[in-house]
Image (cartoon, rainbow, N blue to C red):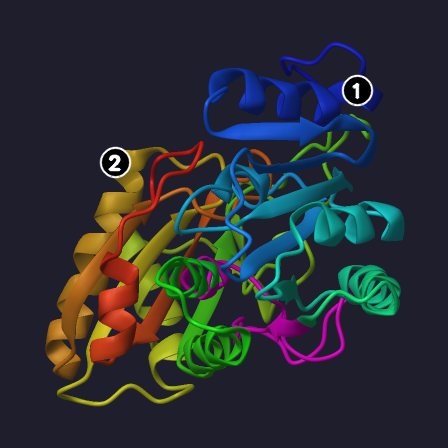
Amino acid sequence: MKKFVNDPEQFVPEFMAGVVAANPDLLEAIPEFQLIKRKNVDASKVAIVQGSGSGHEPAHVMAVGPGMLTAACQGPVFAAPPVDACYETIKSVATDAGVLVLVNNYQGDRMAWDMACEMAEADGVTLKQFWINDDVAVQDSLYTVGRRGVAGNFFVLKACGAAAEAGADLDAVYAIADKVNSNVRTMGLALTSCIPPAKGTPIFDIGDDEMEVGVGIHGEPGRERAKIKPADEIVEMLFDAVANDLPYNSGDRVALMINGLGGTPPAELYVLYNKAAQLCADRGLTIARNYVGEYCTAIEMAGCSLTLLKLDDELEKLLAAPATTACRIF
């Protein structure tokens, strides 16, 4: 294993310290709970919080900032944050307007945030919790009951963050989360496995001529293990699975995301985007906003996911609203 790592047990605290050190005017940390929050929290606005296992950066702590998350906490690589970290994250930014807790649909995350929300509500915090489940690949996985929350999470937190920044109340921000989640679909594909620093070995084996279709962001099995295909055929497979699920129809305006899973060069992502854009045109979809890059990764896994979000005027405006975060890609 070759990685830029000191003590594997300190990998998450060290990279989080680096995020704060690189953004001293924007962010502050509470290291004992592995959480990062905005330096200046407006008590009159709804706070948006999230947190999950590490290894998916820039989600989640690198998405903290004006117009995005108010705070986020991290667990170990591919493991949910502990209950006390989730609780402290909520409490650290609880405002008079309330807190929206966004949770990707994984059993460990849901259990931790459910308990944290109960504790915070017992303390008098006004909050709502919303589960994100945009992955069309499988109905149930090793980590979930129901669909997984993957790269479509970005659109939920971006729209909710913009609505909160504009002064929407908690019920309205929750309604935005529901609208986005109801209209966003994702599917991923892996060409290689990845190596968590504390493990030191790949989390699954895959042949040089194979791909995992519908892989989860923790390396969970997807729909099938298949022989690798040309890029255009891969995009067609992902696009059909996503576009037929909602479905998306001629005349729809959409946001299209090609997300890298951590080990795919930008040039390859644009090869994939080129075909995806052609398929949108063939279906009569207008791409109003596009995103190509790394938004939700699986450490250094070579692979991608394709996400479509059906837009209306409200969502398009929210996605276009300014935001400032550590990763500067939103």
Q: How many marks?
A: 2
Would you name the residue on which mark 2 appears?
267
The front one of 152 and 249 is 152
> Magenta segment, which residues?
128-156
- Residue 43 percent coordinates (x, y): 55, 53
- Residue 219 percent coordinates (x, y): 67, 51
Magenta segment main secondary structure: loop
* Residue type, mark 1 in image: Gln
Q: Which mark is residue 10?
A: 1
Specify the quadrant of the image occupied by residue 72.
Answer: top right
Callout 1: SS: helix
- Residue 44 percent coordinates (x, y): 51, 58
Residue pictured at 65% horizontal, 49% vertical: 93
- Residue 26 percent coordinates (x, y): 47, 29
Please say whether residue 24 is visible from this viewpoint.
yes
Specify the quadrant of the image occupied by residue 317.
Answer: bottom left
Q: Earlier in the sequence, mark 1 or mark 2?
A: 1
The front one of 67 and 230 is 67
